[in-house]
Amino acid sequence: MENNKGELNMSVSAICQDKAGKKYAFVSFTDGVRTAEGKIPACKITANNGFAALEVQELEKYMEAHLTELKKMAAGIDIFSAFTKN
C-alpha cells in the first residue's frame, strides 16, 4: 500500500455477527501515518492511533452521517470471493 500522507483513506469490512446475532462492520481510517477503527452501526471509534480527540469525534460524526452508505458497502463485500478461482 502506498503511503498517501495527508490523504485520509477509508475502508469497510464485510458484515460480521456477534453471538447474540447482532450485525456489525468495521470502518477503518488512515492517512498513512495515523489510523483509527470504528464500528457500525454504533458509529463509535474503538481504536485510535494518532488522531486527536476532536478528529475522533469528526470521524464518528462522519460514520453517523453516512451510515446507510457504509452499511451498503459492508453488505456488498463477499469475503468468500477472495478464495474462489475465476
Image (cartoon, rainbow, N blue to C red):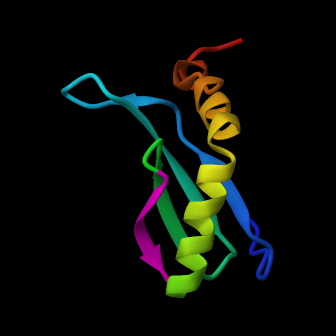
Residue closer to the observer: 74 or 81 = 74
**Span colored in magenta:** 43-49
Query: On screen, 27 above or below 9?
Result: above
Q: Looking at the picture, does residue 59 appear above or below residue 64?
A: below
Q: Residue at x 67, y 51 (%)?
A: 65
Name the residue rendered at 50%, 85% in the picture: 53
Report whether 66 appears left or right of 16. Answer: right
- In the displayed structure image, the side of residue 14 where residue 22 appears, left or right: left
Name the outermost residue toward the left. 19
Q: Nearer the viewer, residue 31 or 81?
A: 31
Q: Quadrant of the C terminus?
A: top right
Instruction: Decide: is 69 above or below 57.
Output: above
x, y percentage for residue 85?
64, 14
Determine the main secondary structure of the stretch shown in magenta: strand
Q: Position of residue 45 (x, y in %)?
A: 45, 64
Q: Position of residue 33 (x, y in %)?
A: 62, 82
Q: Residue at x 47, y 41 (%)?
A: 41
Q: Please tell me whether residue 42 belongs to the stretch shown in magenta.
A: no
- Quadrant that contains the N terminus: bottom right
Relative depth, front residue between 83 and 65:
65
Q: Against 65, is 36 above or below?
A: below
Q: Give the quarter of the image for residue 4.
A: bottom right
Give the x, y percent position of residue 62.
66, 59
Residue 51 in view:
no
Residue 5 visible at all? yes
